[in-house]
Image (cartoon, helix red, strand yellow):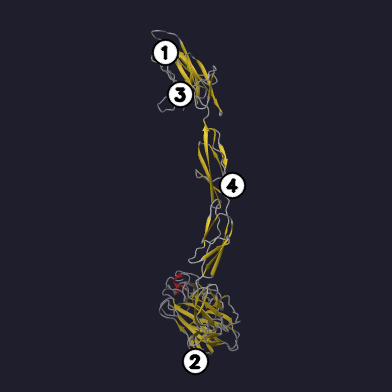
């Protein structure tokens, strides 16, 4: 163990802790793993490698060779005997400690901790991936094979104690290989291990290296004799106080097996295919090339075909590989064939109704005969049917046919060009079965509702055939008249009201039907305009004034805080007396009044203020002028905006 450690490990009682002492079944301990393969054929003059496989301890071939493989070129039976020192039939349970500290018994005890780690005490053990993980002074290294567990031991001062034991079932009179791997965990006083079977030492003691992490192997062969069950153990003979710390891994006990297999090598003569002499024939009379060979396994022609025979229809060199038991021979022949015309009318044709397709059978120097009776190289048709042609070149003929199917055009009719009222939408429907649609605006539906005066078209496509229709849509304007805002008319003057408009009739409240009306007195004037799309009415209130003090009353204002049109106030340029203005809502309730000509209504008043809308106003004032001081009364409406 490591220095300065022994004084921490005084343990009065050594526990013999049995961790699942296991008896391992010995059935099929030697399985025949040698396989030289199936009997085989080689071709005359060639060789083959016979391989017994890697991993065996010795090889003995019938040829006297002791290598893993031999090369042979003669017919015969070849055998090989191999020895296997434990690659099969492993009998030790958890020999690589992948399952932790289980499957074995020990006079040592599992680590119980201390100031140096889990294995602070002598005579303790633990499984880990590196010794330094269980004792601070132990060195760091991996297990024998890398990446797995090992059994790390803090050696005891008592000699002959078993570190690891396991009971195993064996076959009588069978040789077994006993193997284990040992490495030093602390570079002082290396361990010396002894291996026993049923208490009897086997093999030589294994002394660990002074170098840490250097794995050394114990290996010996043992015969079971009459035994059917044995106990194999590993003990430590080193009892020094310092050092004596080590790791065990990959403990193995397996049959020492001998296997034999043989293989028959046959030498195969090459086949002798014969395609005959070179041959010349007329096109249209194919040549049957025959490569049949008794007992042949495979045929491979230059075009990839694999039958014993091949029909040659084009000029050129033809060859075939014939294989028997893996041996291949080749023969070739040249075939000359008179030129033969070719014709390809193409895939089935589907022209749209009203169009034609041209079928082309042109071949240089040839004559033609269509099933329609035509003898030209091409045939143009616009009718459905099957069309065939025979192309003849010096007696060698070729024929082809094609089906022509005329596709009916889809039908579309948006109706005649029309005119509708400006507020009446027009729905047009171009639906046709199995068709797609494209309108001039890019839309793709079958129907569409039109609201604007314009030129509209739709294109229908069905099976590649396209047709289009166009509609010119005009609008009749809705009747409309605007007599303008109410205004003051100076006494003695006239004004003209205009209600004229395109394609509409006019009817004034006095029965006049002219578009314009001349007025010279105050009052309310009404007009009705109409056409086929409906009617429209408008009124205007005219108030007369002497005009020596013109009064301008705004028809709208917007008290929204932007500094523009914030208040409503009549505008005039003369001094006045008896001034009063009153504001009413649409129910006649007075909202605001003022006798100050300079005060403007800011839109307030009412129980909850005022909102956007039209409000009535009444104004009285007496202008102080040279000509007159008559009390004038005016009224009208104002629009409040926010």
Q: Callout 3: helix, strand or loop?
A: strand
Residue under label 1: 547
Q: Secondary structure at mark 4?
A: loop
- Residue 587, located in which quarter of the rendered image? top right
Q: Nearer the viewer, mark 2 or mark 3?
A: 3
Q: Which residue is mark 4?
A: 432
Q: Which residue is mark 3?
A: 556
* Res 141 → quadrant: bottom left
Residue placed at 46% from the left, 22% from the top? 555
Mark 2 or mark 4: whose residue is earlier in sequence: 2
Query: What is the CA distance from the residue labelled 4 to the residue labelled 3?
Result: 56 Å
Q: Are marks 2 and 3 in contact (CB under 8 Å)?
A: no
Counting residues from the start of the chain, the first of labels 4 and 3 encountered is 4
Between discs 2 and 1, the one toward the N terminus: 2
Q: CA distance from mark 2 to mark 3?
A: 126 Å
Mark number displayed over residue 64:
2
Residue 395 % position (x, y): 53, 70
Q: CA distance from mark 1 to mark 4?
A: 72 Å
Q: Which quadrant, please, contains the N terminus?
A: bottom left
């Amino acid at each position: 163990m490591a220095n300065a450690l022994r004084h921490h490990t005084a343990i009065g009682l050594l526990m013999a802790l049995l961790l699942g002492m296991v008896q391992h079944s010995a059935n099929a301990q030697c399985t025949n793993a040698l396989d030289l393969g199936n009997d085989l054929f080689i071709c005359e003059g060639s060789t083959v490698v016979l391989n017994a496989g890697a991993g065996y301890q010795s090889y003995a071939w019938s040829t006297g060779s002791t290598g893993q493989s031999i090369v042979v070129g003669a017919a015969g039976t070849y055998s090989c005997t191999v020895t296997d020192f434990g690659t099969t039939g492993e009998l030790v349970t958890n020999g690589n400690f992948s399952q932790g500290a289980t499957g074995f018994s020990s006079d040592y005890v599992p680590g119980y901790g201390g100031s140096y780690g889990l294995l602070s005490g002598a005579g303790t053990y633990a499984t880990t991936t590196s010794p330094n993980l269980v004792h601070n002074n132990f060195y760091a290294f991996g297990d024998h094979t890398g990446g797995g567990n090992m059994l790390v031991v803090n050696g005891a001062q008592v000699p002959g104690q078993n570190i690891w034991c396991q009971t195993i079932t064996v076959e009588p009179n069978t040789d077994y290989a006993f193997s284990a791997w040992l490495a030093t965990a602390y570079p002082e006083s290396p361990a010396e291990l002894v291996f026993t079977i049923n208490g009897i030492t086997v093999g030589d003691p294994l002394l660990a290296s002074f170098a840490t992490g250097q794995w050394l192997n114990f290996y010996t062969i043992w015969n079971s004799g009459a035994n059917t069950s044995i106990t194999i153990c590993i003990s430590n003979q080193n009892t020094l106080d310092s050092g004596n710390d080590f790791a065990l891994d990959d403990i193995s006990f397996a049959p020492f097996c001998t296997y034999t297999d043989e293989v028959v090598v046959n030498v195969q003569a090459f086949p002798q295919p014969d395609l005959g002499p070179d041959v010349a024939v007329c096109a249209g009379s194919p040549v049957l090339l025959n490569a049949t060979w008794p007992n042949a396994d495979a045929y491979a022609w230059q075009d990839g075909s694999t039958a014993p025979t091949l029909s040659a229809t084009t000029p050129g060199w033809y060859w075939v590989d014939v294989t028997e038991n893996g041996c291949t021979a080749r023969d070739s022949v040249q075939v000359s064939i008179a030129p033969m015309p070719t014709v390809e009318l193409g895939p089935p044709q589907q022209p749209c109704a009203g169009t034609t397709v041209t079928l082309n059978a042109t071949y240089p120097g040839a004559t033609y005969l269509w099933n329609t009776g035509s003898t030209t190289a091409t045939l143009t048709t616009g009718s459905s049917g099957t069309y065939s042609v025979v192309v003849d070149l010096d007696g060698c003929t070729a024929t082809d046919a094609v089906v022509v199917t005329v596709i009916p055009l889809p039908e579309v009719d948006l109706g005649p060009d029309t005119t509708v009222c400006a507020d009446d939408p027009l729905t047009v429907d171009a639906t046709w079965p199995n068709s797609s649609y494209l309108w001039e605006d890019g839309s793709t539906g079958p129907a569409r509702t039109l609201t604007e005066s314009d030129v509209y078209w739709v294109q229908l496509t069905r099976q590649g055939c396209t047709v289009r229709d166009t509609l010119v849509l005009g609008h009749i304007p809705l009747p409309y008249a605007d007599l303008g805002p109410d205004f003051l008319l100076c006494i003695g003057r006239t004004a003209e009201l205009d209600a004229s408009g395109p394609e509409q009739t006019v009817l004034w409240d006095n029965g006049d039907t002219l578009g314009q009306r001349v007025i010279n007195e105050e009052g309310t004037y009404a007009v009705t305009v109409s056409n086929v799309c409906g009617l429209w009415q408008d009124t205007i209130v005219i108030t007369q004034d002497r005009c020596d003090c013109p009064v301008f009353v705004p028809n709208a204002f917007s008290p929204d805080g932007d500094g523009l049109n914030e208040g409503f106030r009549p505008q005039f340029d003369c001094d006045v007396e008896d001034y009063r203005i009153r504001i009413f809502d649409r129910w006649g309730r007075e909202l605001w009044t003022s006798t100050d000509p300079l005060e403007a209504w800011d839109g307030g008043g009412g129980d909850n203020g005022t909102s956007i809308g039209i409000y009535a106003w009444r104004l009285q004032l007496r202008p102080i002028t040279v000509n007159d001081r008559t009390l004038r009364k005016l009224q009208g409406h104002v629009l409040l905006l926010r």
